[in-house]
Image (spheres, rainbow, N blue to C red):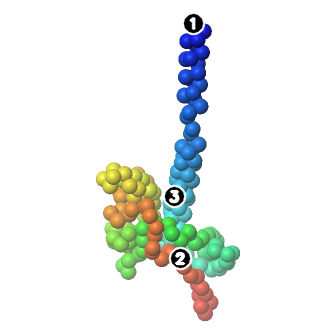
Amino acid sequence: MRYYKSFILFSLLALVFVACDTDDLEKDIDALKDRVASVEAQVQRLNDEMNILRVALDGNKTITDYSIDGDTYTLTLSNGETLTLTQGEVGGNYPSIDISDDGYWVIAGSKTEWRAKAENGEDATITPQFKIEANPDADGKKYWQVSYDNGSTWDFLENGLAEGVNENTPLINKVEVKDGCF
């Protein structure tokens, strides 16, 4: 009798393990990992381009040469530094980034208190950084965040929903030379 009880218990235990199918769960986890990697790459590209803009606009350097390789532009500055600009993917959802007429950063349509252009011989020292995080005030939806102090503090952008499709035009859409000027 003892043998039958052990056999029944072992059979039930084996049935539990056979019934567990985790293939769908593993596929979902892999898909989420791919999405996170894509978003991280998009955020890093945006931060790199912001640094490029800050360097190009600090007033002390000019573009002396450029080259084009497919969708990649390489700029050589007067101090010997090189900048590489690559057109991002169309369809990403990212905030608009501009510079106002009086030289301040305009992030997602809102003018900030931070200068983007050099003024009176002083460099513009602030380069905004961006990341995407879940916003607890918006049911956990992912929103863009911006930092103006090298990542010490982060603020959610009011209209910065990072999910969905971007219908804005790309940040850089054409580069040309006219009369020897870039």
Q: Residue furthest top?
A: 1
Q: Is residue 131 above or below residue 29?
A: below
Name the residue at 58% across, 72% down: 87
Left-right relation of 114 to 123:
left
Indicate which disc residue 172 carries. Answer: 2
- Which residue lies under the disc numbered 3? 39
- Which residue lies under the disc numbered 1? 1
Q: Residues within 10 Å of mark 2 (few under 14, many from 20)?
A: few
Q: Nearer the viewer, residue 173 or 83?
A: 173
Look at the numbered disc 3 and give the secondary structure of its residue: helix
Position of the C terminus, as image quadrant, is bottom right
Q: Residue furthest left?
A: 137
Q: Is residue 32 above or below residue 173?
A: above
Instruction: Please state the horizontal and vertical placement of residue 12, each as a whole percent of the image.
Output: 55, 22
Q: Is residue 151 above or below residue 175?
A: above
Q: Residues within 10 Å of mark 1 (few under 14, many from 20)?
A: few
Mark nearest the camera among 2 and 1 is 1
Say what amino acid the circle numbered 2 marks. Answer: Ile
Q: CA distance from mark 2 to mark 1?
A: 79 Å
Name the residue at 45% across, 73% down: 167
Say what amino acid the circle numbered 1 marks. Answer: Met
